[in-house]
Structures are given as C-alpha cells and as structure tokens.
Image (spheres, rainbow, N blue to C red):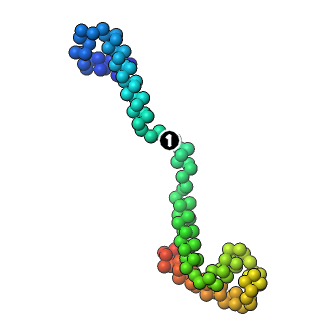
C-alpha cells in the first residue's frame, strides 16, 4: 500500500485523465506480481537448521587427517600393513596376530616395529606427524 501511494506521489502525470482508484489498483497489482516473481527467481533462504547439518571445523580436520593416514597406510608394504591392522586396529595380541597371519610371534613383533617406523616416515612426508 505504501509503495503504491509513493508511486502515485512520484508520478502525478499517470493520474491525469484517468480514474485514480483504477490506477492505484493497477499499480498495487503490478507491485504484488513483481514481488512474487522476484521471490521465485531467487533461491529460498534457509535458516540455521541447514547450517547445523554442516560438520564443525574439527570434524573436517579429522576427516582430512584420516584420509592422510589411510594414504600413509596404503603406501606401506603389504606385510607391514597386515601386522598393523591386526595389532592396532583390530586390537589383537601378538600371539593372536601370529596365529591369524600364520607367522611366528617374533616376526609379528619385528614387522610391527619396522611398520611403525615406515608409517611414521609416511606420515611425516604428508605433514601429519608431529
């Protein structure tokens, strides 16, 4: 309503020779149609609910870090990777890992030692080790 009266005040020549009421209704109708079209042409605004679904910065850092660790593990030799997966990720003892892998317990210990050294080097190359 306010915009309609403002346009009538700014454009008094549009009112000359016409019924004022019909001109005001036409202007008001055009303003409503324009506003409706403008809303449809823009993407709908979202509230804070959409932002709450985004992961926090620390979650993003953890995800990137885990990808780097996965790459570092993939770069290890197969036997080193197997020993680390059994002992650290699956939480098996040296004896259990040796039974599953079919190698002596001393070999599990030795491979674990060298696998950890190789993993530390791979992580340092990726900038993930302290």
Seen in the picture, residue 66 relative to 93 is either above or below; the reply is above
Q: Is residue 31 left or right of residue 9?
A: right
Q: Which residue is mark 1?
A: 46
Vertical comparison of 15 with 39: above or below? above
Percent coordinates x, y for residue 83 in the rendering: 67, 82
Residue 83 appears left or right of 11: right
Q: Secondary structure at mark 1?
A: loop
When the figure is inspected, residue 40 is found, relative to residue 72, above or below; the finding is above
Residue in the foreground of this view, choosing between 72 and 37? 37
Name the residue: 74% across, 90% down: 104
Residue sitting nearer the eye, 36 or 130: 36
Q: Is residue 94 visible?
A: no
Quarter of the rendering occupied by the N terminus: top left
Count of all numbered marks drawn on residues in the image: 1
Q: Residue at x 44, y 40 (%)?
A: 43
Give residue 26's quadrant in the image: top left
Rendering coords of residue 55 (x, y %): 55, 55
Q: Is residue 31 left or right of residue 62?
A: left
Say which of 114 and 76 sits in front: 76
In the image, residue 66 lies at what x, y percent?
57, 68
Residue 104 in the image: above or below residue 74:
below
Residue at 29% of width from left, 17% of height from top?
Answer: 8
In the displayed structure image, the side of residue 30 where residue 111 appears, left or right: right
| Residue at x 37% of width, y 28% of height | 34
Q: Is residue 20 visible?
A: yes
**Residue 9 position by quadrant:** top left
Question: Which image quarter: residue 119?
Answer: bottom right
Q: Classify 10 Å Cα crowding around label 1: few (below 14), some (14-19), many (20 and above).
A: few
- Residue 23: horizontal and vertical position, in percent? 32, 14
């Amino acid at each position: 309503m306010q915009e309609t009266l403002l346009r009538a005040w700014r454009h008094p020549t549009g009112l000359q020779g016409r019924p004022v009421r019909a001109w005001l209704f036409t202007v008001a109708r055009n303003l409503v149609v324009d506003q409706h079209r403008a809303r449809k042409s823009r993407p709908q605004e979202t509230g804070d609910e959409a932002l709450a679904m985004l992961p926090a910065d620390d979650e993003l850092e953890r995800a990137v870090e885990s990808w780097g660790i996965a790459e570092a593990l993939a770069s290890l030799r197969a036997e080193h990777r197997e020993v680390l997966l059994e002992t650290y990720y699956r939480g098996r003892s040296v004896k259990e890992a040796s039974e599953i892998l079919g190698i002596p317990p001393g070999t599990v210990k030795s491979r674990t030692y060298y696998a950890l050294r190789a993993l530390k080097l791979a992580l340092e190359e990726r900038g993930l080790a302290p």
